[in-house]
Image: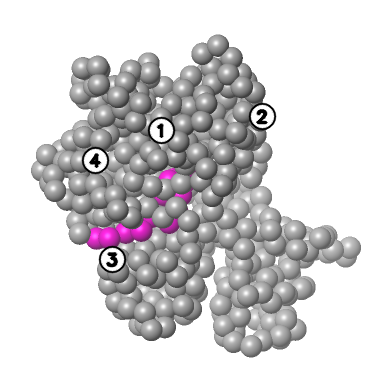
């Protein structure tokens, strides 16, 4: 593994890359193309504009917008200003966005007004009131400025992007500010999904992001000249770090995807000769399903990132598409990159595990009393090393619950290590359900169902049962004609009784959230 260059911070990395490789194209977004030199210059203009608004080191700057070239420029400009990027999901509505803005005390908010017909400014005005004094919204006391992205207009009380840039022309110390950023300074506050309650803000600093995603890109073999569509939202840790940041680190060309659809993605693969593609197994199933007659031979690396990947999917990707490698990986917002499969790993390892810990990261499997478990036994996954978050923003109580006094991150995920150190992630502790006294893990059952010859995808949720307490209900996307009763019968023959789904529903596709993961809330709603 080649060592991380001595960049220390993202602003210094961008300057060094732009000085050494100024003409390398790192962003292509429709007609918008950015070389490293252009990105560095445009980011500096944003940083000057933010400084003119009074943004200083450590201030939070929020971005509520879909993936785009402008998002990349703004993020780099925020880092240049010594401020902290605070992304908001485009799936948020007013109440959710206001809660995160209020929690982080963001001073500036960038919005893509009117994306998919939605008014971000209007949604905030509805829940937070109109302008009060110097505040754009009366109920957001720390927010001072709202800036619209280029070409989206500037409804009151917003400031047009072009006016932000014009206001920064009088700032003369922007370069000094960028070079003053330190390796331990916060770079991001990333919102968790909020599935356990109020979303938390994960604090990540420059040095850990540079190291984590340099190593991630090295294992993936991301390199200069690669063309890589970023499907995961930049508001998600994978999108901004294993997408945006990784491309800058390795001088690969990113194509930000604002709205995913299979046919346009296949068009992009053919037209732009895409070489690296990342997403959940559902994405690759859809690609294979609709790839007949398409030229996808330019693809060389697939990054799946799932608790279980069907072995047949991996074989089809290698044989049908001609991929050099398929990578599986495990990471989480609070722990950045944890484990990855490596080149040369057999299909069975890639399918059933997320590989070995990356350099500088340690994984332990412990029981409910915190005692280490031997290889093969399941327990909670604990993560140690440089990748562990600084904590949750302004939330010491929940930080103490997640990171113990010795620095171990308690992930809440259940897993096991094999004799070679490969990590199998079984499920979330909270997703576990109990069938007649036995612990059942949906992800494990899903992985087992994939061994059925007619099952292409599976998702399992728990439902109440008068006798056993809870039982599994499986939603299955078939690869060949099959009846629900056949799958139940097969499961009774091949699985432990408590793991057998009591009901199976055949579906054409599994619902997915913004990150491409199966939306189990939507599946549970179908049951009611």
Q: Which residue is mark 3?
A: 272
Looking at the image, residue 354 sits to the left or right of residue 429; the answer is left
Camera-side mark, 2 or 1: 2
Please, which residue is most extreme toward the right here? 466
Residue at x 51% of width, y 68% of height: 282
In the picture, the disc for residue 112 is: none
Residue at x 29% of width, y 76% of height: 297
Q: Which residue is mark 1?
A: 85
231 drawn magenta: yes
Is 386 placed above or below 364 here?
Answer: above
Q: Which residue is mark 4?
A: 39
Looking at the image, residue 227 sits to the left or right of residue 135; the answer is left
Which tag, 1 or 4, sits closer to the chain's start? 4
Residue 510's x, y, as percent?
61, 67
Q: In which quadrant of the rendered image does the N terminus lie?
A: bottom left
Q: Which residues are magenta?
A: 226-239
Which tag, 4 or 3, sits closer to the chain's start? 4
Residue 99's x, y, as percent?
61, 30
- Alpha carbons under labels 3 and 2: distance apart: 43 Å
Q: How many residues crowd around disc 2 within 10 Å: few (fewer than 14), some, or many (20 or more)?
A: some
Q: In which quadrant of the rendered image does the C terminus lie?
A: bottom right
Is 317 placed above or below 521 here?
Answer: below
What kind of element bears circle 1? Answer: strand
501 drawn magenta: no
Q: Which quadrant would residue 168 be assigned to in this image?
A: top left
Relative depth, front residue between 160 and 300: 160
In the picture, the disc for residue 127 is: 2
- Alpha carbons under labels 2 and 1: distance apart: 23 Å
């Amino acid at each position: 593994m080649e060592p991380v260059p001595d960049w220390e911070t993202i602003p210094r990395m961008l300057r060094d890359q732009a000085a050494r490789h100024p003409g390398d194209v790192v962003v292509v977004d429709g007609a918008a193309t950015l070389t490293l030199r252009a990105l560095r210059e445009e980011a500096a203009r944003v940083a000057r504009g933010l400084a003119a608004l009074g943004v200083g080191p450590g201030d939070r700057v929020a971005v509520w917008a879909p993936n785009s070239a402008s998002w990349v420029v703004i993020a780099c400009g925020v880092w240049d200003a010594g401020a902290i990027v605070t992304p908001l999901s485009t799936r948020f509505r007013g109440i959710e966005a206001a809660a995160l803005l209020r929690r982080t005390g963001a001073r500036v908010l960038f919005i893509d007004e009117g994306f998919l017909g939605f008014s971000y400014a209007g949604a905030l005005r509805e829940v937070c009131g109109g302008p009060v004094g110097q505040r754009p919204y009366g109920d957001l006391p720390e927010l001072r400025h709202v800036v619209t992205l280029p070409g989206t207009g500037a409804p009151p009380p917003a400031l047009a992007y072009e006016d932000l840039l014009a206001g920064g022309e009088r700032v003369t110390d922007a370069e000094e500010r960028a070079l003053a950023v330190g390796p331990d300074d916060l770079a991001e506050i990333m919102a968790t999904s909020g599935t356990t309650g109020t979303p938390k803000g994960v604090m990540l600093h420059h040095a850990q992001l540079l190291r984590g995603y340099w190593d991630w890109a090295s294992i993936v073999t991301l390199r200069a000249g690669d063309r890589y569509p970023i499907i995961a939202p930049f508001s998600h840790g994978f999108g901004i770090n294993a997408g945006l940041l990784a491309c800058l680190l390795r001088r690969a060309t990113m194509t930000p995807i604002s709205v995913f659809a299979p046919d346009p993605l296949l068009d992009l693969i053919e037209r732009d000769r895409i070489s690296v593609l990342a997403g959940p197994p559902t994405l690759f199933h859809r690609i294979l399903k609709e790839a007949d007659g398409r030229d996808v031979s330019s693809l060389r690396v697939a990054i799946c990132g799932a608790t279980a990947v069907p072995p047949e999917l991996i074989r089809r990707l290698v044989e049908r598409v001609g991929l050099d490698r398929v990578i599986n990986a495990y990471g989480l917002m609070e722990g950045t990159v944890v484990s990855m499969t490596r080149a040369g790993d057999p299909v069975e390892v890639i399918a059933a595990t997320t590989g070995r810990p990356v350099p500088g990261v340690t994984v332990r499997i412990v029981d409910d009393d915190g005692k280490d478990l031997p290889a093969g036994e399941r327990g909670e996954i604990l993560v140690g090393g440089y990748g562990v978050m600084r904590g949750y923003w302004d939330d010491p109580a929940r930080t103490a619950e997640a990171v113990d006094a010795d620095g171990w991150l308690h992930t809440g995920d259940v897993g096991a290590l094999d004799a070679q150190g490969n990590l199998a992630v079984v499920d979330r502790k909270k997703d576990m359900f109990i069938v007649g006294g036995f612990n059942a893990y949906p992800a494990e059952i899903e992985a087992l169902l994939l061994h059925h010859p007619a099952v292409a995808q599976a998702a399992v949720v728990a439902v109440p049962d008068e006798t056993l307490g809870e039982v599994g209900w499986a939603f299955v996307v078939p690869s060949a004609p099959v009846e629900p009763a056949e799958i139940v019968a097969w499961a009774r023959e091949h699985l432990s009784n408590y793991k057998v789904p009591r009901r199976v529903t055949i579906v054409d596709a599994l619902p997915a959230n913004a990150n491409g993961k199966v939306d189990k809330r939507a599946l549970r709603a179908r049951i009611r």
